[in-house]
Amino acid sequence: MLILSRGDVHAVLDGAHESVLRTVRAAYLAHTHGETSVPQSVFLRFPGNSRDRIIALPAYVGGERPVAAVKWVASFPENISHGKERASAAILLNSVTDGRPVALVEGSVISARRTAASAAVAASAITDGAPADVRTGVSLIGCGVINYEVLAFLRAAFPSLAEVTLFDLDPRRARAFAARVAGQWPELSVEVRDRAEEAMAAHRLVSLATTASEPHLGTDACRPGTVVLHLSLRDLTVESILAASNVVDDADHVCRARTSLDLAQQISGNRKFITAELGALLACRILSPYAPDSVVIFSPFGLGALDAALAAHVLDTATERGLGLSLPDFAGQVPVEANRVS
Ligand SMILES: NC(=O)c1ccc[n+]([C@@H]2O[C@H](COP(=O)([O-])OP(=O)(O)OC[C@H]3O[C@@H](n4cnc5c(N)ncnc54)[C@H](O)[C@@H]3O)[C@@H](O)[C@H]2O)c1
């Protein structure tokens, strides 16, 4: 068993945006080609507490480097008022040959980066052929860990990105985020807006990563031809979902757990509002639904296949570099003979 800490994961992934984008793109293609197994996630909740949760996401990804893994990811939104990150996670990888556990990897960095990379991969695929200005500015609604990573991956995918507009319910979080962006990427122009609608109207690329649990925002303020990356899944009203073209990662996964798409499905009685799955776009099986006069929304449930694929990449690179703590006797060895009844 190899144990990889957060520091080990950073050592592998920091500055490696291109390889993360490649790994995530390949996982979506494997999913659309039927080379994955991704059971529904299991939500652990606590009696009398609708806010906190821990989710298990098991997944298998086949292909040249098969991997089986489970991500166990906790979301405790109140953490941020105590100076701690909302999310924490661990990923357990198993051998696909004998099933035995082979590695335990800190999961929060992998989880955040695969989410941000999925947003950038989707934005690239959806805006392929769109006017160039769609890729020059982004509005970030919710100034937390995920949207910071989204900005980093959008910069990697769209070198022309120059302007960032921010909104957060907590203005201090927006100001702190702006200061961090100015320090890390001084070439970007950053502004903070007082209302979500003002921020939504500022650019034709919008990323929603809040902790809202009920829909609170429409897309009326968006300019025609806007692409909304709806990563937090529960911000947008049913009306705005039904009025838009919708790209998802997997329709069966995203239409559950009271996401905006689940509510849209319950109200409309069907899933006809879903235009495409991202894997089919990437495989060029269908064309992007982008149109200069309408809004496209990308809502990814967040497939465990992305975590598994990126964790395998981290494990392989860390092993090559000799990183991590090895526990050869973690599971011990019980001779099969010892269990035989004589
Ligand atoms: N789809 C996926 O694959 C995926 C993966 C990981 C995280 N997420 C989701 O992304 C979201 C953000 O995660 P994070 O780690 O950045 O959280 P975070 O707690 O670090 O940041 C969330 C920010 O949103 C702000 N906020 C809350 N409600 C708001 C509202 N109504 N309007 C504007 N701002 C608001 C908070 O003040 C906070 O600054 C979470 O909902 C999480 O579940 C999705």
Image: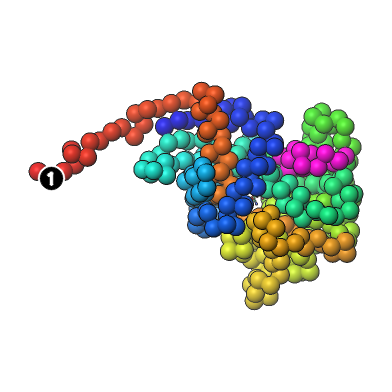
> Quick one: label 1, few (<14), some, or many (20+) residues within 10 Å?
few
Tell me the quarter of the image containing the N terminus: top left
Magenta stretch, residue numbers: 148-162
Residue 78 location in percent, x, y?
Answer: 64, 44
Q: Residue at x 46, y 40 (%)?
A: 93
Instruction: Reply yes or no: does residue 215 show up in magenta.
Output: no
Query: Main SS type for the magenta part?
Result: helix
**Horizontal arrangement in the rendering, residue 129 relative to residue 28 (left or right):** right
- Please say if 181 is above or below 342: above
Residue 168 location in percent, x, y?
Answer: 79, 46
Instruction: Reply yes or no: does residue 152 show up in magenta.
Output: yes
- Which quadrant of the view contains residue 262? bottom right
**Residue 94 seen in the current view:** yes
**Horizontal arrangement in the rendering, residue 62 relative to residue 169 (left or right):** left
The residue closer to the viewer here, 299 or 156, is: 156
Specify the color scheme. Answer: rainbow
Instruction: From the image, tell me which residue sits under label 1.
Output: 341
- Please say if 75 is above or below 257: above
The residue closer to the viewer here, 282 or 120, is: 282
Q: Which residue is drawn at 16% across and 43% down?
A: 340
Tell me the quarter of the image containing the C terminus: top left
The residue closer to the viewer here, 19 or 15, is: 19
Q: Residue furthest top?
A: 322
Q: What SS does tag 1 mark?
A: loop
Residue type marked 1: Val
Q: Residue at x 79, y 29 (%)?
A: 184
